[in-house]
Image (cartoon, rainbow, N blue to C red):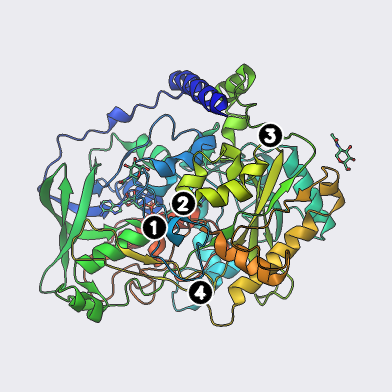
Amino acid sequence: MICQVILWNILASAVILFCGAFFRVDFKKIVQNDWNLKEYDFIIVGSGSAGAVLANRLSEVNNWNILLLEAGQPGNIITAIPLMAPIFQVTPYNWNYTMEKQDGICLGMEDNTCAWPRGRALGGSTVINYVIYTRGNPIDYKRWSDEGNPGWSYEEVLPYFLKSENCDIGSLCDSKYHNRGGYLNVEYPYASILSKQFYKAGLEMGSKYVDYNTEDYLGYSRIQANLRRGRRDSVATAFLYPILQRPNLRILTSARVTKVLINEDKLAYGVEFYRRGKKYTVTAKKEVILSAGAFHSPQLLMLSGVGPAEHLQELDIPLVKNLPVGKSLKDHVTYLGLIFKMNVTVNNKFSIFSPQEVLNYLLRGKGGYASLGGVESLAYIKTKGSKTPENYPDIELMLSGIGSLEADYGLISRRELRIREEVYDKFFRPLELTPTFAILPILLHPKSNGFLKLRSKNPLDRPLLYGNFYTDQENADLKTMIAAVRYIQQLTQTEAFRALDATPNTIPVPNCEVYEFDSDSYWECALRTFSVTVHHQISTCKMGKVVDERLKVIGIKNLRVADTSVIPVTLSAHTSAPAMMLGEKTADIIREDWNEKQS
Ligand SMILES: Cc1cc2nc3c(=O)[nH]c(=O)nc-3n(C[C@H](O)[C@H](O)[C@H](O)COP(=O)(O)OP(=O)(O)OC[C@H]3O[C@@H](n4cnc5c(N)ncnc54)[C@H](O)[C@@H]3O)c2cc1C
Ligand SMILES: *[C@@H]1O[C@H](CO)[C@@H](O)[C@H](O)[C@H]1NC(C)=O
Ligand SMILES: *[C@@H]1O[C@H](CO)[C@@H](O)[C@H](O)[C@H]1NC(C)=O
């Protein structure tokens, strides 16, 4: 065991050195010194999925000056390797937040508390995420627009997905749902033969093979990913590095914004920020745009006096505008205990340490290093008894070809997910030396709703975050997840999976031994024990409630929010592409509002 760990480290370093020569990403090009503090036309706070795209598109207008402020640092050579995705949550690229402790969830975690990671980097969460590229489907956007948000229907947002895209997934690119020539690369990551069995099993279940980024999305698919020849295409590498020479765009990293400045006319005119221990203020002639993500945009609004009156009063923050900031917080929850043993070694955990693998990756961007941390394929399904509209998925399945937490021998994932050691030892460790795969069910449209509050007036304090998973009155969320478990049990008994001798793990989930194994109450307990996030937090500055359909903060002039916090409805998607779409569309809205020609 110890030998393996040492071997891992030595080989990993060697590989990284090799890669260094190949990647040659020149991060120093970002000039950080000769910035001025006079004023800018637009100040964008946060350089994630939405903020980076906005910075790119707004700076296309030559006579506008843009300042992009980011609390984190640029990514590096290692963040470029998609296989490494699981390790970045234990680096400075994560804000390291946790949910507040709540009854009935996260029961297998340290202190019964789940981690809630978010990216803190130039490129935001796209520097630490799994680069899975999904947009959601027409019904998602119909719901978005029907909630009183004109402009956000599928027909109206599709052009913005296409605008970003540089499609590199073969013949699928020829359909009207894909585009070539955009900033953001879309290609296939590594997938083993296990994926083929997964699709075959899906067919046996009566499903079909689809491109989930079209209007025919219900079914099984290869994953489309934001990679460029196997390297992570974060929004920084895609949208910012190519335009660093623009004289009207200033990017400042390590700059932590603490307040939006709003005058008596309720007009936002600048921000206050800290950089290397010094405090600065900078003014915006036209607008301040918050793209600080689902946790920090609401935090900044409240620190600036925009939020629920009673909460701000509690903290003695002068009220500027009473709005339900942080009152909703939706996320996607999953379960990582559905691990299956098989009789073939598909993805040997050490096979990547071969010269062929390294060369294959360096030269072609293919092979195990181009794996999304083990995630290979996905499916959108509708479970038995589902109450969603016809053809509307309630569950996404993610196939992991290297099992679950045990794939790294409990070294990294266990820690970042805060799984207790004795829980790991009982449930996951016995699987370490067996070939396994896992199927993760994702609850797409939870009824449960979380919330977020300030912990204190101190702008550097982390907010109070409540997930509220599995708390809806009718228990609909748990029922759907149990239906998904049953679906996966059936799926893994198809001929396709029997050919691999797929057998479910029969070790009971620690904490749930009291229930009859495989009964619904057993699964309820299991789901509550490993109730982990898929990192898709939305709705904390909900459109229609906190911002209007043009992303303007209601009742405040010259202030907008553009990031996943404004998304008003749960999406059948991972949320990075939707946030990029928001960035693209917001840029057009802003141009329209200031009478600048559209590009
Ligand atoms: C571990 C992980 C895996 C994920 N995997 C996927 C995936 O495979 N596919 C997918 O589609 N989605 C995935 N997601 C979700 C997706 O990445 C996010 O939903 C999306 O990137 C959010 O975009 P955003 O623009 O809202 O915010 P972010 O990308 O989170 O950007 C916000 C930025 O603002 C900065 N910021 C915050 N506060 C301040 C402040 N006060 N001052 C200055 N800067 C500030 C932050 O440092 C950050 O860089 C994942 C997320 C995580 C965390
Ligand atoms: C998060 O924790 C890791 C160690 O687990 C640490 O290296 C990193 O600096 C922390 N990030 C922040 C933003 O504090
Ligand atoms: C795995 O098990 C299946 C079903 O029992 C069998 O057909 C197959 O030959 C086995 N494969 C190997 C490599 O043992």
Between the residue at mark 2 and the residue at mark 4, the CA separation in whole angstroms equals 23 Å
Q: Which amino acid does label 1 sit on?
A: Thr
Q: Mark 3 points at which residue?
A: 347
Instruction: Give the mark nearer the N terminus: 1 vs 3.
Output: 1
Task: Say which residue appears at 49% left-offset and 40% top-offset.
Answer: 412
Q: Which amino acid is tagged 4?
A: Ser
Which is more N-terminal, label 2 or label 3?
3
User: Could you tell me how many numbered marks the image carries?
Assistant: 4
Place residue 290 in its image quadrant. bottom left
**C-alpha gap between disc 1 and disc 3:** 32 Å
What's the residue type where badge 2 is placed? Answer: Arg
Q: Earlier in the sequence, mark 3 or mark 4?
A: 3
> On residue 435, which mark appears?
none
The image quadrant that residue 50 belongs to is bottom left
Q: Where is residue 67 in the image (x, y as percent from the top left)?
A: 22, 48
| Residue with the mark numbered 4 | 448
